[in-house]
Amino acid sequence: MSTSPRRIAIFGATSDIAVAFARAHAAGGTRFALSARDGAALDRLAQDLKVRGAGEVTVRTVDFADLSQLPAIAEAMWGAFGGLDVALIAYGSLPDQAKACLDPALAEEALRLNFTSPALLVNTLAGYFEAARAGTIAVITSVAGDRGRQSNYVYGGAKGGLQTFLDGVRHRLHASGVTVLDIRPGFVATKMTQHLPQTGPLWAQPDKVASDISAAIAKRRAVLYTPWFWWVIMTIVCALPRAVFHRSKL
Amino acid sequence: MSGSDMSASPAASRTRLYGSWGNILRAEHETLAPRSVDGAREIAARLPAHSAIARGNGRSYGDVALNPGRTLVDMLGLDHFIAFDATTGRLRCEAGILLSDILAVLSRPDRDGSGWLLPVMPGTRFITVGGAIANDVHGKNAHGLGSFGCHVVDLELARSDGRRLVCSPEENPDLFAATIGGLGLTGLILTATLQLRRVPGLALEAEDIAFDRLEDFFTLDAESAQAWEYTAAWIDCLAGGEALGRGIYMRARHAPGVGAPPPARAPSRSVPLTPPLSGVNGLSVRAFNALYWRKLGSKRRKSHVGSYEKVFFPLDAIGHWNRLYGPAGFYQFQAVVPPEHAEPVTRELLAEISSARQGSMLVVLKRFGDIVSPGLISFPMPGITLALDFPNLGDATRKLLARLERIVVAAGGRIYPAKDFSMSRESFAKGYPALQDFLRHRDPAMSSAFARRMGIVEEEDAS
């Protein structure tokens, strides 16, 4: 596989990390198949990528929370350029944990968008990539999936489940030479976190996360903590004995 | 709800601390951050009177993009290219895109080294297109190509009455003229079409020449104007007496057939935090000026061919260099005086600075040509412009700035609002004779610390 992918599909293409990733790969005629819910934002991004040097950009609006749309979108994105080098799954939502504790509908919605939907999508895409015997399926999960915490276990639980699911898909695809990359960012200054302060040493910019993703794809890595120090933090958090952990407010 | 859904709402509101680039003032602002041109238009339509000002990448030294206690509309989310025609060189983009991005994406050498370049390049590439228009910035080629506004084909403006207007020399020409250099007070600039220029080689042939006194600057400048597209001089402002106005004349022109890759999108080195004391003091300024004056060696002349980065953007090499001035910050001062008074007034200004012993490291002297900017209250006008920065020593610095301002205005000159933090209302009105005309095009919702300081927006108007 060449280090610079030529055909990229992005699911949730208007997320800030996805935009930064796409822009970093636009020069040199890369072809993009983009999907997201906001059609106007997709069109704007498509124009932007073309000026930045993309060869061809197709867009498709889709509601990832509607699971019935997933097989068709997977097929359309795979078929746009007769196969893919990289599929990046970048959609998700950050639910209000306190509200999700009380409202089963809200919790269900968050679990569907952060676990069920991407898991089903990966499962479908895995079939295409397996047959082609090449390429990378990259999925943005979160460091929040590493250990359940009182402050966001609805989101964290969905992401943790997705991590395990990806582990299994990676096992399945190993024989066919397909890479499955599990991307675990920490705090990223994006519109998803716009209600938070977004300042301090732990906050990363989308550009940094995007360049880490590009490097991890080129190196065919399995799991990426981005920025790197989250690997250290999560190793410590996961190693804390339960008795100690439960006294924290994390 | 996916991340992309949130862009459907025009903006999230929150409070954030913003400062001027000179760090003279830092203040809490209510901020709105639109993610699209439609979102920005919706924001503009909901703004109350005298409430808000657009902010780009925060490189204005003074208070033109500050609005303490009120609203800033952070335009950095409008960062999309819209279209580029590689045959005509016309670029359409959103207003929050940075000049560094335009250079990185579009100014790439062809096989013969030629390419499309921004026609006007200010001293930093880390500013937005909207900010470049609102301050009608200029570069080292102002004598040949005028200001940034001279190359704006059209722009879209969101007004607080809900309208989204296309403005150009043909369409809404009055509003176009008010918006170029209009300090953001005519509404939110959403998009712009820029005419890029084809250059025979993206690399520059640059020459530095040491000169001993102010007269020599004018001689060198007169003989360079035709053959050298980019010109400016650094002045050793601590030199007095016979040596008053000595410095280094810098001139450059495109090297045909020689390419130059675009400069990096971000500085490789950065000042990580503001030191508790200013690193810029009498001692370091003396040392810097003495060394810089001698940097060309005994030949007193140096030339090279290479990237345009060092010629255009010397200060961009170190990120957050403004922090070196410590917590008290620094004042910038830039003024232009008409050609007929250029030499004596420049001499008077330099003598004033030299005798005040308040040295500056960055002292730039440059001639503006006769190309008239389309902006009603644009800063560039024919004459000589002098730019300096002074560490903030409190009263002593403000008094010096007031003396410099008096000399400039008495000579029929004007002060650059993008760099100002101390000009008087009288000097502003005198320096910008079209001010009353401009005020008719002001958007009633817009307001800034500068606008209130200048009495453009009355304090008592504010809710």
Image (cartoon, rainbow, N blue to C red):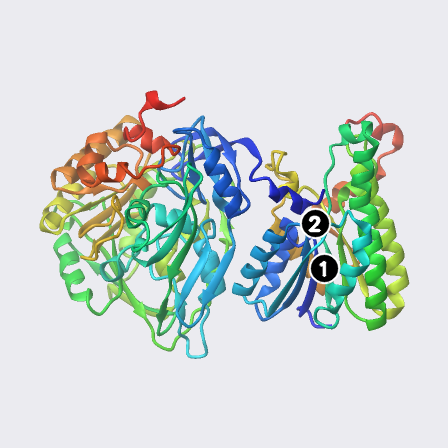
On screen, residue B62 versus residue A25, left or right, reads left
For the residue pair B1 and B335, the one nearer the viewer reads as: B1
Determine whether label 2 and label 1 are within 8 Å by CB.
yes
- Residue B355 visible to the viewer: no
On screen, residue B384 versus residue B35, left or right, reads left
**Residue on which disc 2 sits:** A226
Looking at the rendered structure, the secondary structure element under dot 1 is helix
Q: Earlier in the sequence, mark 2 or mark 1?
A: 1
**Which residue type carries mark 2?**
Thr
Quarter of the image for residue B252 reads bottom left
- Residue B141 appears at what percent x and percent y? 27, 60
- Residue B202 visible to the viewer: yes
Q: How many marks?
A: 2
Query: Are discs 2 and 1 both within one chain?
Result: yes
**Residue on which disc 1 sits:** A216
- Residue at figure coordinates x 87%, y 65% from the top left: A174
